Amino acid sequence: MDNFLYSYQQRINAILEKCLPDAEVVPTDLHHAMRYVVLNGGKRVRAALVYATGEALGVEIDKLDHLAAAVELVHAYSLVHDDLPAMDNDDLRRGKPTCHIAFNEAIAILTGDALQSLAFEMLATQVTAISFEKRLQIVAELAKAIGSTGMVGGQALDLAAETKSINLEELENIHLCKTGALIVASIKLGILASACYDKTTLKALEHFGCAVGLAFQVQDDIIDIESSTEVLGKQQGADRKKHKTTYASLLGIEKSKEYLIELYQKALDYLKEADLIESNLEKLAEFIIRRNH
Amino acid sequence: MDNFLYSYQQRINAILEKCLPDAEVVPTDLHHAMRYVVLNGGKRVRAALVYATGEALGVEIDKLDHLAAAVELVHAYSLVHDDLPAMDNDDLRRGKPTCHIAFNEAIAILTGDALQSLAFEMLATQVTAISFEKRLQIVAELAKAIGSTGMVGGQALDLAAETKSINLEELENIHLCKTGALIVASIKLGILASACYDKTTLKALEHFGCAVGLAFQVQDDIIDIESSTEVLGKQQGADRKKHKTTYASLLGIEKSKEYLIELYQKALDYLKEADLIESNLEKLAEFIIRRNH
């Protein structure tokens, strides 16, 4: 099942390697840190969603490379800032010290800032074979998805929820923003690179993105409890220690697993609606609910 | 002299007021903070540079509004992050508590992040009457100027310089990145909004931007010593307390003032070269060297 993902991963890692500034360019500590946090063996689920969506809609893969890279740069920036002491205060990420531990807090803040700018610079300069109008739509889509009512807004809601109890609806809203917005944007970038304008397909793919985004988070909560620190690459049980509200804490682990299967089914139904059921998108949805880290 | 600046300030404040999310939209603390740091009576020098450049090149002012706003959003984000405890650790900005003091550190980090995204979202969605191709160039220009070899790179170099002594050339390089890059970008955005493609004019305006950017910083160093905390709106003598290398510490205050006049003269010479000497750009250069806060 993971062969297609491995090939996407290899591809995006090579692109990211090339588009990041050389570590020897001044300021070297900043450039070292940018490479450290991006080229660290991430799962590249968001890049894979760009590739799989675009390919399912008939786009040649090299037209998707820099869209996928922009999404991964943004994802890396968000992790670096989320890990900061003032935020989630995490020391370990993918089995290695987080950026502010490996470097320092100031460099970690600047690394996230510079990665965000680099994502937009790449969309504006590196993407070719897509019309100027579509490329501006892509910039707009990504910028909105990661802004104050999207990814960053979700992180603000998540932090606020640490000091109060929230219900399932509020939890879902947090994750639809914090994780879902960038996942849906990854799919939309793949769509924007294509010549597909069919409204049913587009709506169904967007719903697929929301279902997959939530499923991703539910599985995250499950593996936070069931996996080991070694497999996770980050502290096992971290959410529980922080008394965070999670799907597992609200529903219990068994009901969370049922909910995960329900979301997976929904995702597949939306793919059928989009007539894209036998694509890599289906395999990606399966990977997301089966992963153990 | 300041009448033209006052009118630019009024104009950009109204635009910023409108383009920021309403403070009552969820997450309210984040949106409150975004408005708090942007709508705080800044001097709006960067917006004024966009307006003055564009107008000098025959662009109608309303075509420049969202370019000017994007530049001010980016400037506000950079100040919020620079003020953080892990960076310059400043408590006071424009006479009010800095963002992490008025809110908290996590909100300050997220506020900066969201303002950066909003700047790009606005360039991609709000700017009209400029071709898609030019708008993408504008996104590219701004993104590059504020990235790891521009504004953010300058801040990284500045922080690294706190623990070692640097010479005048190194100090200039820091400021050309940290302050100069966004000032030059403001001018370039005004140019990109115009129909001017004359290489002499463009080169001369870019050099004008570098001279003005450095002059801005030299004047900053002078008023850090000569103004009061009340007039400054931030801690007077803050640089000296941090043992920061400044123009004043390297050259002495008198030589710094001579250098400021020299840069001002250079700036005017470049404006003459661009045949734009009797424009608001000249008045802006004068304002920058005369300001006391």
Image (tube, coloured by chain):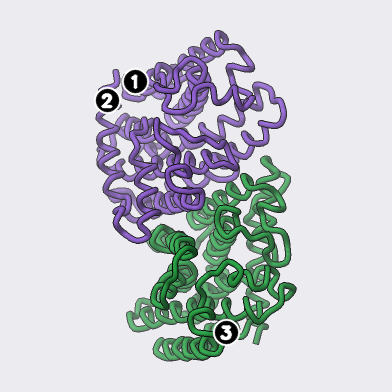
Chain colours: A green, B purple
Q: Where residue B283 is drawn, which disc sits there?
A: 1
Mark 1 — on which chain does it sit?
B
Please name whichever residue, B216 or A192, is drawn nearer the observer in this view of the structure. Answer: B216
Query: x, y percentage for residue B16?
Result: 31, 44
Q: Name the residue under label 3.
A: A289
Chain assignment, label 2: B
Q: In which quarter of the image is the C terminus of chain A?
A: bottom right
Tell me which numbered mark, 1 or 2, is placed earlier along the sequence. Answer: 2
Left or right: B277 in relation to A93? left
Q: Is residue A142 visible?
A: no
Let me know if marks 1 and 2 both belong to one chain. yes
Mark 1 to mark 3 CA distance (whole Å) = 62 Å
Residue B95 occupies which quadrant of the picture? top left
Residue on which disc 2 sits: B4
Kindly state the secondary structure of the residue where label 3 is placed: helix
Q: Give the percent coordinates (x, y) of residue A80.
A: 60, 57
Of the residues shown, which amino acid type is indicated by label 2?
Phe
Give the residue drawn at x 61%, y 58%.
Answer: A89
Circles 1 and 2 in contact, beta carbons < 8 Å: yes
Amino acid residing under circle 1:
Lys
